[in-house]
Amino acid sequence: AQVSERANIEPDIKALVISAHTPGGTVDSTELVANAIRDSRKKVVGYVNGLCASAGVFALSQADEMVMENSVSAEIGSIGVLMVYVNQKKAMENEGYEVEIFRADGSEDKARLNAYEPLTEELRTEIQQDLNDARKAFVGYVRRGRAGRLKSDEVFSAKMYKGKQALSLGLVDRLGTLADAIKAAKKS
């Protein structure tokens, strides 16, 4: 985000190319990066450098144009949200440990999601709602960033797509090289 702010005030910089090779990441800070790309006063071209999944798509979809590496292994997608929870209580008991969690009075909501206590139905409902809300925001950003270019809601299933399919679905604007992305940026 700071890089785009600095680039926007630097008169010698005419456009930005963001080359992304990422399996994705966490929800936190993704909106900040996406907003920095979206709000850039200078043209931003996103370049899918082999792999751009999940949080990478969230952010890069806000670019003015997207170029995807034209290779058999390049992929983009995974527009979805998940959380992995592992209850370690039985494993700890099998090792001879009995875990007990103490909370200060008035701190009953502290660390309700942990690896040692079972999930309550209320907590399961909250987690599911949080995941649904995060997905809704994710889909909203991609829809806005790729407005008029997406050809199908199929892209929101969290599937990964190879070049020609990503192009036909509107996830990217063209297949090419980093040099092609730089050329596109120079056309600002």
Image: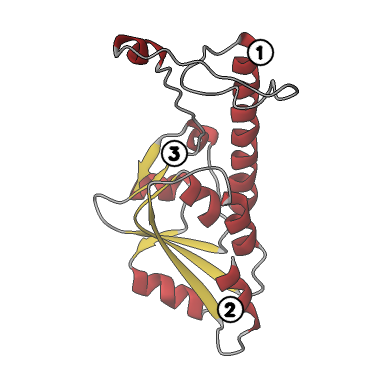
Rendering quarter of residue 90: top left
Q: Which residue is drawn at 55% across and 72% down?
A: 3
x and y percent of residue 76 in the render?
Answer: 40, 47
Give left or right: position of 133 versus 174: right
Q: Mark 2 points at which residue?
A: 7
Q: Which residue is drawn at 66% across and 13% down?
A: 122
The alpha-carbon separation of the residues under discs 2 and 1 comes to 46 Å
Instruction: Choose mark 2 or mark 1, whichever is in front.
Output: 1
Give left or right: position of 36 versus 99: right
Residue lying at the far bottom of the rendered structure: 12
- Please say whether residue 148 is visible from this viewpoint: no
Q: Name the residue under label 1.
A: 122
Q: How many marks?
A: 3
Task: Give the class, few, some or many, for how many residues have Cα within 10 Å of label 2's Cα (few <14, many ≥20).
Answer: some
Q: Which residue is drawn at 59% across and 63% down?
A: 37
x and y percent of residue 125 in the render?
Answer: 64, 16
Between 166 and 36, the one lying in front of the other is 36
